[in-house]
Image (spheres, grey):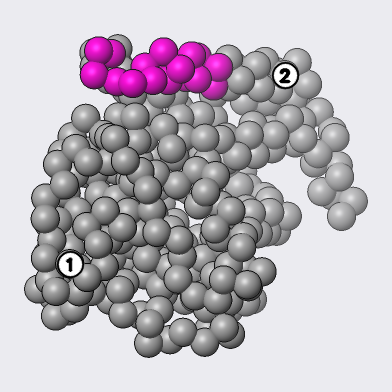
Amino acid sequence: MRNFLKYLFCLEKNPKKGLMAYEWIVLAYLAATLVMAGVMHSQLINAESMIWGRLKILAITLALWGVYRMLPCGLTRTARAVVQMSLLSWWYPDIFELNRIFPNLDHIFASWEQGLFGCQPALLFSNVMNSAVFSEMMCMGYYSYYPMMAVVAVAILLVKRVSFERVVTIIIGTFFIHYVIFILLPVGGPQFYYEAVGIDEIAQGHFPNLHDHFNHQQVRMTCPGYTDGWFYALVEQAHQAGERPIAAFPSSHVSVCMVLMLSAWVFRLRKLFWVLLPFAILLCLSTVYIRAHYAIDALAGVVSGSLCWALLYPLTRRLDSPRKNTKKKKR
């Protein structure tokens, strides 16, 4: 603990001059979507708020960089990562403003689901496994998403500090890769599509094309399961706060979960890996159970998470090199 406190409050002798790798990723996405908002300004409902929101994040990023440059220590360095990780939830509903200009594709994915499994797993799972205990286990798994992220990041910071920037870059990079996919591939998921079409129609294998339906209606069905459960209430509150008919394929919950588990394993946090494994399994299953995703979304999330790791892990290798915080001796 003494070494960690020393890291937080002792000034760095050779502070990093430029932006962190994860900040460059944020700014690249910010710039690309800012251009999209500018070009498609007339087609977007909240174009001005989107533009101002991006300018605020740019200001926050530069302000954090400036504070770090004035007071270069572990505390200000870590604050830069914490803020960008926290802002990931801000970016999520913002995707809907961009992808709603494209036609909805839920009918295609529901048809693929039916062809692959012969049914709709998201429709049947909660009906078959409907006990209060199982429902709470599923909701607990789903709600563990952000706590898992925080636990892995903190563990890396405490135990493998030299790899902290690298892991944060991989996590943030994974998020923004998926955000780009979600913009170009508008799939709302069962909780929105089933509600719009009707459960009876879905059960009979009818999957109509809704075109721009979600531009005007974003009504979703509530989560199935034990409605008096504590974790059920937490999941419902989270969905009510920021859920939109977006981001179903592939499941970013499953994908990021894969990245977190790979991070724990590869960076030799093996005890943490085994502690988190049950939560990771529950999380993957819960995405289908609560009807946030089709089963093919969850399977695709395993693949996309693995691919993001395979892409970003080698690209961030140089971030793992120890920083030299000692001044060269004068000859």
Which secondary structure, mark 1?
helix
> Which quadrant does the N terminus fall into?
bottom right
Which x, y percent locates residue 188?
29, 50
Check if residue 43 falls in the magenta segment: yes
Quick check: 111 above or below 226? above
**Disc nearer the start of the sequence (2/1):** 2
Q: Residue at x 52, y 48 (%)?
A: 240
Horizontal arrangement in the rendering, residue 120 relative to residue 310 (left or right): left
The reply to whether the C-beta atoms of the residues labelled 2 and 1 are less than 8 Å apart is: no
User: What residue would you read off at disc 1?
Assistant: 201
User: What residue would you read off at disc 2?
Assistant: 67
Which x, y percent locates residue 92?
44, 39
Quick check: 141 above or below 159? below
Give the spatial CA distance, label 2 vs label 1: 57 Å
Q: Nearer the viewer, residue 259 or 145?
A: 145
Horizontal arrangement in the rendering, residue 95 relative to residue 199 (left or right): right
Q: Residue at x 46, y 17 (%)?
A: 49
Q: Residue at x 41, y 32 (%)?
A: 94
Tell me which secondary structure the magenta stretch mostly adopts.
Answer: helix
